[in-house]
Structure formats: C-alpha cells, structure tokens
Image (cartoon, rainbow, N blue to C red):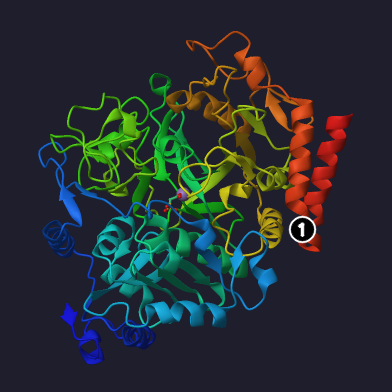
C-alpha cells in the first residue's frame, strides 16, 4: 500500500480512524518522506521487506538450509545497545519523572528534536506500522502505531508485535493508541534522542537503529509509557518473564520474574527442567515484559504484550538453552552476531570453536587477538509462536493467574540462592532495594553494582517513589497476593567460578518456591527473609563444592549491613516522596541485622 504523503483519502482505505490519519499526516508534513507505506502485517509484506533489504545490503542471507528464513543485520558500531544517557522522560513537572530518569520539558524536547525530524525522511519511505501489544481480543491489549524510515525496524516489528489489521480492528475509531515516531537520522550519537511524553502517550526516537531504542513497542511503549498508563489505570507494566511450572499431577502454576537485561531471563523462561523425568516442566508465556492486571476476583493476572523474543545471543547454546536454539533456527533476524564461512550464525559460547574464516560482527575477518567475534549484546529476533516450550495459554486473552513473583539479578556475592519475603510489603521493599551488576545490554561499564529496583531502573516512566507506592497499593487490592521471592543464580567462589550450576538445575529452586506457595517446603526465618532449611532444596546428583549449599543459604550480616547503607543512599534521592513503608522496612531490616 504505497501512496504519496498528501493522499489522506487513499490512506482512509486502510483505516477510518481520523485521529490516526491526522497524526500520520502531521508526521509526514514534518518528516517529508518521498512515499508512505502502511504496513498490513502479512507474510507477503514481510517477505518483500526482506527481499528489499537483501538487495540494498541491510541484511545478509544466512545458510538457508540449516537456517531457513534467517538473516543477519549489522548495526553501526556506535549503535549496539540501549543508551540510557540519551533516553528522556518529558513531563511538565520534573518531579513526575523523578531522579531515576533524565528529564526534558515537553516544549524544550520538541523544539530541540523537532528540528532533527524536520525533513529527515526526504527521499526515504515512511513506514506506518499499526501494532497490537497483547493477545488479540484481550481487554488488556493496547494499540501502538510506529512510524519509521527503517525497513529493519518494520520487519522486526512484524516479529515482535502483531502488525496490521488485528491492531486496527482492536483500535477501531478510538483515539486510544500510542503514536511513536522513529527515524534513524544519520545514526550519529550526537543527534540521538529517545524521548517519552507520558502525558500525551507519545514516543519520539531519533538517531538509533538499535532494538530497544528503535522497536518502539518494546521498552518505550510496553514499559516506559505503559508504566505511566498503568499507574493511572490501576495495573502494572513490568520488566518480567512469565512462566508456567507444571508439576507431576499436571497442574500448572504461573510465576512472573523481574531480572535486568542480559541476566538470563530468556534462559529461565525457556528452561529445560532437569527434573523433567519427575514431572516438573516449564512453559514459556513471555521472556521480557508482563502486563499485570487485577481481575474481578482480586487475582493478579499476566499477559505477555509481545509476540516475539529479542534475546541476547552470546552464551546461548544447546547446553544452556536448547529451546532457544530450536526457536532461532528459522524465521529469525540476527543482529551483530558473527557468521561462519558456511553462512551460519556464531557467537561466543555457542558450543563450538570459532571456525577458520569466521567473519566478526562488524563484517571483517575475525582473529583471536581482536577479542569477541559477536558483539556481547548481539541479539536474535524470533517469533514466540515457534518456541517449542510456548505455553498453550500464552495468548489467552484473560492472561494467566500469577502465584509468585521473583526478583533476580546478577550478584556474585552476598545475595542467597533464594529467599522468600515475609509478606507483600517486605517483598516490595526487597524489590525496591535490589542491587544488580550491570551488563552489556546498556552502554557503559559492565559488572558494577547499582540499585535496579524491580529491574525497572531504565524502564520506569515516572518517579520511582510513586512506583513503589503503586506496588504497595496493588498489594492491598489483591485477595491473595502472590508470594515474593528473591533469587540469585550468579554467586561466584574465590576463583570466580559459579557456585550453583544454574540453567535447567534452577528447577530445584522453582520447586521449593512451588512448595512454599502450597504452604509446605522447609524454611527458617532470618534477619533478611525466609531462607530454605539445609535440606529443603533437593541437590541430589549435583556436583556442588562442599559447603556450597550452606554458603548459598546463609546470611552475611556485615555484607547486608553494607547493602542497607547502599539502599539508604539510593532512597534518599526520593526525599519525602518515598513511601514510609519502604523506610519502615529498611529500618526493620537494619535493626534485625544489628540484633
Ligand atoms: O535493547 S532492549 O532494551 O530491547 C533489550 C534489553 O535491554 O532488555
Ligand atoms: Mn529486557
């Protein structure tokens, strides 16, 4: 559906939504594209996008025998991860955005970045992408419309969201959609801005072609803007995976887990249980984002707003995540991975040695001295529906009932393998104070501990003090609030080796969590939380170092007292706005540790 920018009549064949037509028209006047293409979301359209990108070099064809319909994209070397320093929340009042966000006033942001958008699509095609976040027919689903001049973005949106008619039908004539304007511009970091206007539900992204900066349905809409809508409307938009844990009787219990980017969320979401023979199996509902609503019975329910996975490639292998390896064998767009002479994707820890003649992520011959062949934040973009462990209920319009919430992050020391919060309020406190070692998913130093509450620090679209208050309030509205747990698979010993085997063996921890949900499972009360009793977690058949389990389930008092100080430094930024409940929990934790 190609048309001249002015022909609003022609576009109205696609939709009769006046607000949408007007916004697209205004956008075209600003960006001045040579032509406009309304995306219909069909396979034919996807294929033609791919064809075009193979022709102009945006994509490289991978081995079509081993990886049918798989392609490689190389982004600019300075555009390989989210850029938190260039990401802004634009609200009238700076306090609304909070100390956790970069802020610009809406008029200032529009003035500054509007100039960059002016005429930025000259000679280019403007793609209009109506998309649905959430299952078709769900009352919890929401519509976005992304306008972009990047075909890579348009094709990726086909995978990550539900594009075309399904979205327009959900929208009908309502003005209730989230417009998102994206242009790659000249890809200069000096002219790169990722702007969110929660008060008008608008996204502007300029100067980046990378994932979270450019696929506006994901972090920009489904987390930053959605978190603001959720605050207003009484639900929660969270950086969480959702899994179903099937027990030997066939009953499935659903859990949601918040982990920072590149901390194994996708691995956990697709875990092949090491206790499969005993009847414990994990089903995948989502691997990155959950929208949580309270239903009429006071039960928390989750939908996965996305339709695909945008996962970290390095470290993914048949040993660590066979389900992902199976999922990304076809219909997948890879970004910034290496490629073998046979045309197959390759990355560090894929499970094979780098072959002779490997081409690195920048497109050059790789040699060992040059470091990593794949970028540490290289990604795969694959349809969720083709994942072998996808839950039969992943598109249930009512969502799935959540019985437990997990906080997880990389902590090589201090934080036990698993602990259970005393109650909802204590659980919210544990999430609010979560420390995390930074990863390659964002530009900056890797491995330094920062506070990353609920794994939402880069994604909460408003003041986090209000976010904590919202969490506390939601708990009061739930008839049976999910139990809250902190997990940490990432403890290391003095030699830098992981203490716990992780991956499929994490099922042993999930099983304890399931027992706790059912009122069983051995636990002891400690200063920080309930910890598993020595034999509560089955370790049969694991080659753990002597004393490992004791280390993983004990409390390092002086370490935690330090942590308490770090939390305090983080909380004081929020001044009076921080809920008193958080300070109370903080005070209680310190006095228990000092007792
Ligand atoms: O780059 S994204 O923000 O889309 C992925 C992530 O960092 O979690
Ligand atoms: Mn993420």
Whether ligand 2 has any atom under 8 Å from the Cβ at mark 1 is answered as: no
- Above or below: residue 466 compared with residue 327: below
Q: Taking 516 as reference, is 581 left or right? A: right
The quarter of the picture where residue 279 lies is: top left
- Above or below: residue 132 compared with residue 408: below
Which structural element holds mark 1? loop
Residue 409 x, y percent position in the rendering? 57, 38
- Judging by the rendered image, the residue that carries numbered circle 1 is 578
- Above or below: residue 515 compared with residue 379: above
Crowd class of label 1 (few under 14; some 14 to 19; many from 20; radius 10 Å): some
Question: Which quadrant is the N terminus positioned in?
Answer: bottom left
Residue at the spot x=45%, y=46% of the render?
441
Work out whether residue 366 or residue 285 is closer to the camera in this orientation and state it: 366
Residue at the spot x=78%, y=54% of the render?
572
Work out whether residue 505 or residue 473 is closer to the camera in this orientation and state it: 505
Question: Which quadrant is the C terminus positioned in?
Answer: top right
Q: Is residue 113 visible?
A: yes
């Amino acid at each position: 559906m190609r048309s001249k920018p002015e022909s609003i009549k022609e576009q109205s064949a696609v939709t009769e939504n006046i607000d949408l037509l007007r916004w697209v028209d205004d956008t075209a006047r600003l960006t001045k594209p040579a032509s406009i293409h309304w995306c219909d979301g069909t396979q034919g359209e996807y294929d033609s996008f791919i064809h075009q990108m193979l022709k102009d070099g945006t994509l490289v064809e991978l081995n079509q025998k081993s990886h049918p319909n798989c392609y490689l994209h190389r982004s600019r070397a300075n555009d390989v991860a989210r850029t938190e320093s260039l990401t802004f929340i634009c609200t009238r009042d700076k306090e609304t955005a909070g100390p956790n966000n970069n802020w610009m006033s809406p008029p200032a942001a529009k003035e500054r970045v509007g100039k960059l958008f002016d005429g930025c699509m000259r000679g280019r095609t403007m793609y209009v992408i109506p998309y649905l976040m959430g299952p078709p027919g769900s009352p919890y689903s929401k519509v976005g419309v992304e306008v972009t001049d990047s075909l890579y973005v348009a094709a990726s949106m086909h995978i990550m969201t539900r594009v075309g008619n399904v979205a327009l039908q959900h929208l009908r004539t309502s003005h209730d959609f989230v417009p998102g304007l994206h242009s790659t511009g000249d890809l200069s970091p000096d002219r790169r801005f990722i702007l969110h206007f929660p008060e008008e539900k608008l996204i502007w992204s300029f100067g980046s072609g990378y994932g979270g900066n450019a696929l506006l349905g994901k972090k920009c809409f489904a987390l930053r803007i959605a978190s603001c809508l959720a605050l207003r409307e009484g639900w929660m938009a969270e950086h969480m995976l959702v899994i179903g844990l099937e027990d030997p009787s066939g009953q499935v219990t659903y859990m949601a887990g918040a982990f920072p980017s590149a901390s194994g969320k996708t691995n956990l979401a697709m875990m092949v249980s090491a206790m499969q023979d005993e009847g414990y199996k994990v089903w995948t509902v989502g691997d990155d984002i959950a929208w949580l609503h309270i239903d009429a019975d006071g039960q928390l329910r989750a939908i996965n707003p996305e339709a695909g996975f945008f996962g970290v490639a390095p470290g993914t292998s048949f040993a660590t995540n066979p389900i992902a390896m199976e999922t990304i064998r076809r219909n997948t767009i890879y970004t910034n991975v290496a490629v073998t002479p046979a045309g197959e994707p390759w990355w560090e820890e894929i499970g094979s040695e780098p072959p002779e003649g490997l081409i690195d992520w920048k497109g050059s011959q790789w040699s060992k001295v040059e470091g990593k062949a794949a970028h540490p934040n290289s990604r795969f973009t694959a349809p969720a529906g083709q994942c072998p462990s996808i839950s039969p209920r992943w598109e249930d319009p009512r969502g799935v009932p959540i019985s437990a919430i997990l906080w997880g992050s990389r902590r090589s020391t201090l934080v036990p393998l698993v602990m259970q919060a005393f109650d909802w309020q204590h659980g919210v406190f544990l999430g609010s104070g979560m420390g995390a070692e930074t990863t390659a998913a964002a530009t900056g130093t890797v491995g330094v501990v920062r506070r990353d509450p609920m794994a939402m620090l880069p994604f909460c679209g408003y003041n986090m003090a209000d976010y904590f208050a919202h969490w506390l309030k939601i708990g009061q509205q739930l008839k049976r609030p999910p139990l809250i747990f902190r997990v940490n698979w990432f403890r290391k010993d003095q030699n830098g080796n992981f203490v716990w085997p992780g991956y499929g063996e994490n099922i042993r921890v999930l099983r304890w969590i399931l027992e706790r949900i059912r009122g069983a499972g051995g636990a002891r009360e400690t200063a920080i939380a309930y910890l598993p009793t020595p034999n509560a977690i089955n370790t049969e058949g694991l080659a753990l170092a002597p004393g490992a389990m004791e280390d993983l389930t004990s409390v390092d008092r002086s370490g935690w007292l330090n942590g308490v100080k770090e939390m305090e430094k983080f909380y004081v930024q929020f001044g009076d706005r921080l809920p008193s409940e958080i300070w109370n929990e903080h005070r209680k934790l310190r006095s228990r540790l000092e007792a």
